[in-house]
Image: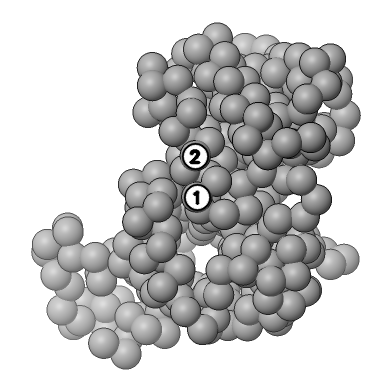
Amino acid sequence: MKQKKAPKKAAAAKGRHRSPNRTDRKARTAASDLLLGAHISIAGGTHEAPARAKAIGATAMQIFTKLAQRWAERSCADDECIDFRRALAETKVRATVAHDSYLINLASPDPTLRRRSIESFVAELARCEALGLQYLVSHPGNYIDERESGIQRNADAISEALERVPGKTVLCMELTSGSGTAIGSSFEELAALIARVSPTVRERMGVCVDTCHAYSAGYDLVNDYDGVWRHFADVVGMERLRVLHLNDSKTPFGSRRDRHELIGEGSLGPAPFRRIMTDERLVDIPKLIETPKLDDATRTDSRMLARLRRYAAGSATRT
Ligand SMILES: [Zn+2]
Ligand SMILES: [Zn+2]
């Protein structure tokens, strides 16, 4: 383990007034309290991910629990779970998230594909429980034929999966950018999906808002930041918001496309990210980047997280 250097600014820190009140939300936006991280590669096995998260200074981490582009399933053996938890314990990561496979379509009208998707999704949930991951982010399916019946098929499949895999992992339906027949590109549709999930498991449902998807889907986080969240609170409820994906966008507002860009360098620009990083309502929500990693994932992700931490600190010192 690395030895921590004595902080040079100890005297300055001591002199600064620190509120003893733990509920002081302002104080909690300090860099060490942020739940901030990235989507991390599991190359070499899930137990390799925590060290990569540590290398970028992450306090939150998202992983795939298998090869996301393949149907091949796997379960997590005890050894893998022990190794993963041990590696995780050596980091400052306090929020753990899995993202499900892109092949899964729980809303499909094709019974064979839908059944295959449900079995795959059940395996996703089981791996999350085995690894002790707090959240599973899932893209709602594509309805293909008819929107209403697609939402119902999606909700029924979720109910079945959650009933078959009891546990603690919270399933977060991700806001989509609205391309093709994708379900979930509006707050109303996410709310409708959750409302149709069996009440016996609905408590285990949350939502993941992706800033790139939101902007592409027509939620103007740049010019109407407060309005967007007011709308979200009215339709979905802030208590359902459990994960944030922080991505800028390569495409313009309302494009209905899903092309992530580096933070502050796309069509959203720095302003909405500054707001998010200092928004008291979002302090406890894990914030994960899924931005391009360019030719060096560690260096690029570190740079993006440093940028977001600066946004967080910028406002805290202004007040
Ligand atoms: Zn996302
Ligand atoms: Zn995306």
Q: Nearer the viewer, residue 196 or 258?
A: 196
Q: Nearer the viewer, residue 39 or 187?
A: 187
| Callout 1–callout 2 Cβ contact below 8 Å | yes
Residue ranking furthest to the bottom: 318
Q: Residues within 10 Å of mark 2 (few under 14, many from 20)?
A: some
Quadrant position of residue 149: top right
> In screen coordinates, is 86 left or right of 40?
left
Q: Report the colour scheme.
A: one colour
Disc 1/disc 2 C-alpha distance (Å): 6 Å
Q: Nearer the viewer, residue 293 or 158?
A: 158
Name the residue carrying label 2. Answer: 192
Question: Hey, what amino acid is under mark 1?
Answer: Glu
Question: Hey, what amino acid is under mark 2?
Answer: Ala
> In screen coordinates, is 33 left or right of 136?
left
Q: Which mark is residue 188?
A: 1
> In screen coordinates, is 56 left or right of 109?
left
In the figure, 311 relative to 245: above or below?
A: below
Q: Residue at x 25, y 69 (%)?
A: 27
For numbered disc 1, what is the local secondary structure? helix
For numbered disc 2, what is the local secondary structure? helix
Pick the quarter of the image with the C terminus.
Answer: bottom left
Residue 7 visible somewhere in the drawing: no
Q: Residue at x 47, y 43 (%)?
A: 191
Q: Residue at x 39, y 74 (%)?
A: 226
x then y, percent, for residue 48: 71, 37
x then y, percent, for residue 240: 40, 44
Quadrant position of residue 301: bottom right
Q: Residue at x 86, y 35 (%)?
A: 69
Residue 161 visible somewhere in the drawing: yes
In the figure, 258 relative to 10: above or below?
A: above
x then y, percent, for residue 83: 62, 25
